[in-house]
Amino acid sequence: MHPIQHPRNTIIIGGAFVLVAAIYALGAVPLGYHIEWAGVTMLAALGVAMAIMFYVLIAGSSKD
Amino acid sequence: MTADSHALATTGEHTPLAGLAHDTRGGISNVVLGMLLFITSEVMFFAGLFAAYFNTRASNHPWPPDEFAHILNPFSIILVATIILISSSFTCQLAVWAIRRSDRTGFLRNIAITFVLGVVFLLLQAYDYSLLFEEGMTLGSGPFGTTYFTLTGFHGAHVFGGVIMLGVVLYRGMSGQFSSRHHDAVEAASLYWHFVDVVWILLFSILYFL
């Protein structure tokens, strides 16, 4: 099995989107904007969705 | 179905690669795959609802409106409903673990308890709605009422769907259709139920505490 196929990598995929969501949220403060929670929510949820999709891809692929 | 694909579908082994995968060469059952894809779409569906809620909340002050501020008490019947739904997730998982080790009695007991807890949650939510209606809070009570009932209503509809799913699983279990090798429907139903549970925890936290 290629190392990238390990299901734990789904955390990395999802975490990347959550990190972008965190930057989007926290970056607004020093720039003088209000945190835009709708966008943060969508980015975080996209992370969850991407993580599931990545899990499906690797769990569903053949090990041959 | 070819002999090879039939073998893929019936080996029934849980590999270290993925707890839900059902073949030692890799692969995932169609039922679980379909449910995972469905849940993925549902994640984005509820994300849209949550985003709409935050957007509406940002443009309406005060939030909640003064006339409804005293109504949404988290330490009321809704907390009991929350505890019941969270408990049902545990019993659902106990049912999955039971059928994985071919403990049909334990499986039926736990899936029946999960089913009953789901029904009780729906009844409590209906009772909570009736209390809110008595206080004058309805779907037409401005942005606050609209978003509250849309979010909780869609979640309730999903719980209703999950209860039907659990009912089918319970019926099939009583008919002896599940074993440690053949229980994909149980795995899929439990995934959905856990998802509905997580959505409610987020809903409850955001609506009542944020």
Image (cartoon, coloured by chain):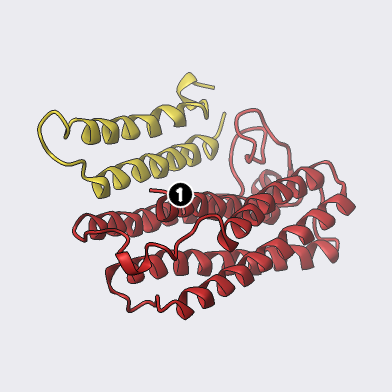
Chain colours: A yellow, B red
Percent coordinates x, y for residue B134 in the rendering: 48, 80
Quarter placement of the N terminus of chain A: top right
Quarter placement of the C terminus of chain A: top right
For mark 1, name the chain.
Answer: B
Residue A10 showing in the rendered view = yes
SS for dot 1: helix
Residue nearest the viewer, comparing B50 with B23: B50
Residue at image point 47% right, 73% down: B132
Percent coordinates x, y for residue B168 in the rendering: 71, 68
Instruction: Answer above or below: position of B197 versus B124.
Output: above
Residue at image point 33% right, 71% down: B146
Residue at image point 37% right, 39% down: A47
Percent coordinates x, y for residue B95 in the rendering: 77, 49
Q: Mark 1 points at which residue?
A: B205
Percent coordinates x, y for residue A46 in the rendering: 34, 44
Q: In this view, does B60 lie to the left or right of B26?
A: left
Q: In this view, does A50 lie to the left or right of A26?
A: right
